């Protein structure tokens, strides 16, 4: 399940609706916190598309066996 927290005019707002999450994540002017608990493949794809992260990065993030590391991609580390 994905939950997004963001500040809306000083008020902390929580979202779980996937369409609204996609809209918030696509707005670079909004700082948000993403909480992913046992995300589905569909939710991982949503994160990958909205954040412009490679799907392998997102799947590593979601993996319980993933060890922390730094990987360099074209537009992010």
Image (cartoon, helix red, strand yellow):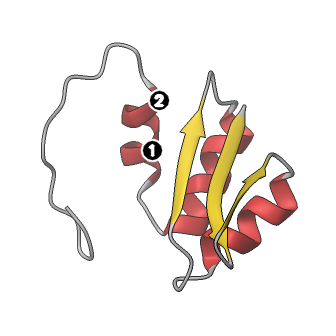
Residue 65 shown left or right of residue 9 in the figure:
left
Snapshot quadrant of residue 6:
bottom right
Residue drawn at the location 25% of the way across and 69% of the way down: 76
Residue 29 shown left or right of residue 12 in the figure:
left
Q: Which residue is mark 1?
A: 58
Residue drawn at the location 29% of the way across and 22% of the way down: 66
Snapshot quadrant of residue 47:
bottom right
Percent x, y of residue 21:
74, 60
Q: Is residue 49 above or below residue 64?
A: below
Percent x, y of residue 70:
12, 47
Residue drawn at the location 81% of the way across and 45% of the way down: 16
**Numbered circle sitting on residue 67:** none
**Numbered circle sitting on residue 62:** 2
Q: Residues within 10 Å of mark 1 (few under 14, many from 20)?
A: some
C-alpha span from label 1 to label 2: 6 Å
Percent x, y of residue 8:
70, 73
Quadrant location, the N terminus: top right
Q: Are marks 1 and 2 in contact (CB under 8 Å)?
A: yes
Percent x, y of residue 35:
57, 38
User: Residue reaching furthest front?
Assistant: 10
Taking depth in this image into account, of 25 and 44 the one nearest to the observer is 25
Residue drawn at the location 73% of the way across and 65% of the way down: 22
């Amino acid at each position: 399940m994905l939950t997004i927290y963001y500040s809306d005019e000083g008020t902390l707002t929580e979202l779980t609706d996937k369409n609204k999450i996609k809209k918030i994540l696509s707005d670079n002017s909004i700082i948000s916190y993403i909480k992913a608990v046992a995300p589905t493949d569909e939710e991982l794809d949503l994160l990958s598309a909205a954040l412009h992260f490679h799907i392998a990065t997102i799947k590593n993030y979601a993996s319980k066996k993933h060890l922390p590391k730094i990987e360099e991609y074209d537009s992010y580390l």
